[in-house]
Amino acid sequence: MARASTVHVCSICAHEEPRWHGRCPGCGEWNTLVEEPRGRSAPRHGGVSTAKPIALADVSAPEVPRLATGIGELDRVLGGGIVPGSVVLLGGAPGIGKSTLTNMVLGNLAGAGHRTLYVSGEESTAQVALRAARLPGAALSVPAVAETDLETVVAILERELPEVCVIDSVQTLDARELSSAAGSVGQVREVAARIVGVAKRRSIAVLLVGHVTKDGALAGPRVLEHLVDCVLAFEGERERSYRTLRAIKNRFGSTNEAGVFEMRQGGLVEVLDASARFVKGATRAPGSVVLAAMEGSRPLLVEVQALVSPSDLVPPRRVVNGLDRNRLALVLAVLARHGGVALGGSDVFVNVVGGVRVDEPGADLAVALAVASASRGVTLGPPGASTPIAAFGELGLTGELRWVAHPERRIAEARRFGLDPVLAPRGTEATEVATLRAALDVAFATAPRVAAVAAA
Ligand code: TYD
Ligand code: MG
């Protein structure tokens, strides 16, 4: 007999069924039934509320000091540290460094005299301790417990009352009253709701770790975004050392901030001048352009590299690292239609060096120039120049170049490293280009003319 304590509720029409169905009998949508504890979604009747509305100006909102994590980049992304009693969801692909980062945070806070707790549902305490031993500071002084049962975890939190705790991860905790497996949407939602409940009731700040699949889908965590106060995305290529930390939602700060980290032997290290590193490493070869990107409100120079080679495959390969695949498809289409660079018979590889992910339309022009330069086998920029050219701007479908946010900061960052020219959309103080065609003309104007190496 099915356990009567749960129901399956359609996430679209709220139709309830005692058992799971692939297709909702209520609205006919597929895969929308999610298991929930019985009674959760039932409408509440009666009960005249005694709560009286108050003018917002009269609401007392005491300033609670934030908890500084001791990791400057993280504190900045959070808007000045962890707010007591807040719930922060930290999403990222497996192996990106979520456990490392959260363990370092607790270590620093424990070292500063705060009560901390590390709840691991993924690893044994021995494994957690092995990692902590590699980390700097007081990481080893953090109390840890390995537990996957939600009830037990909530009971431990109620008993220990830490100021800050880490739950690693939301997908591994198991709400017993739900029959679905840990990590399923219904489970993850229930786990998060219970954890948020105890966090608010007891004023425990929680860093909730959530796994995200490789293609960026917050499978599971996505359904949690509205429950938590803050959603942070930890991104990068696992095989490389650089990682970016971005706020996607933040009730207590801006979502404009981002931090850059490097994974080293002794844990994550903040990268304070990431541009300097990437520019120094830029190759200045055919297919290389420096992109003046924005990481939150900070400019960041990264090298975009492209390789174009003749292909027998139909369709040819499009391999991209650190950028959105669909965005590359768009750039290639615009290049073909408005730039005279047709690559239908070529494999195209594009890579943001260092494993950084750049998710902004401002990357278009740099990608287009890198691909065009690779396709023609020509190094961009004046001959003999020691610095690479830089670019930014969004490509429109008609081949025009569109304005993107913070042009002056991007240009200032590129000038700081002597990059010349800086190709940018109109309305900026750089070498202004109105269209992709104009950008290609400027970029190739001073470059030595070489016959196309790839089938155009
Ligand atoms: P981890 O934090 O376990 O990733 P996640 O919790 O997101 O799955 O660590 C990821 C990788 O980082 C792991 O493969 C080992 C590596 N690592 C270092 O390179 N240096 C270190 O000091 C530590 C602790 C881990
Ligand atoms: Mg982990």
Image (cartoon, helix red, strand yellow):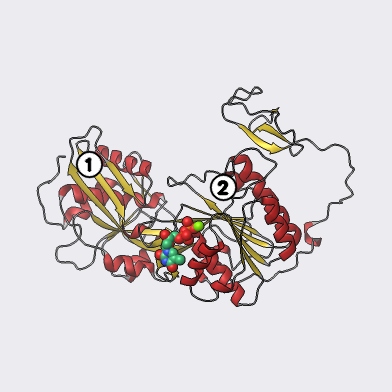
**Mark 1 secondary-structure assignment:** strand
**Which residue is nearer to you in this view: 109 or 411?**
109
Beta carbon at label 1 within 8 Å of ligand 1: no
Q: Amino acid at mark 1?
A: Asp
Spatial CA distance of label 1 from label 2 is: 35 Å
Whether residue 394 sits left or right of residue 306 in the image: it is right
User: Callout 2 environment at 10 Å: few (<14), some (14 to 19), or many (20+)?
Assistant: many
- Please say if 122 is above or below 328: below
Residue depicted at x 35% and y 59%: 240
Count the marks: how many? 2
Q: Quadrant of the N terminus?
A: top right
| Residue under numbered circle 1 | 347
Residue 8 position within the rendered picture, expressed as x and y whole percent measured from the top left: 67, 32
Which labelled disc corresponds to residue 158? Answer: none
Q: Does any atom of ligand 1 lie closer than 8 Å to the CB of label 2?
A: no
The amino acid type found where label 2 is placed reads Pro
Residue highlighted by disc 2: 221
Q: Nearer the viewer, residue 95 or 331?
A: 95
Determine whether 367 is above or below 409 in the image: above
Residue 97 visible in rendering: no
Question: Which quadrant of the structure image shows residue 88?
Answer: bottom right
- Taking the spot 49% from the left edge, 75% from the top edge, the residue there is 136
Q: Position of residue 282 (x, y in %)?
A: 26, 63
Q: Position of residue 342 (x, y in %)?
A: 21, 38
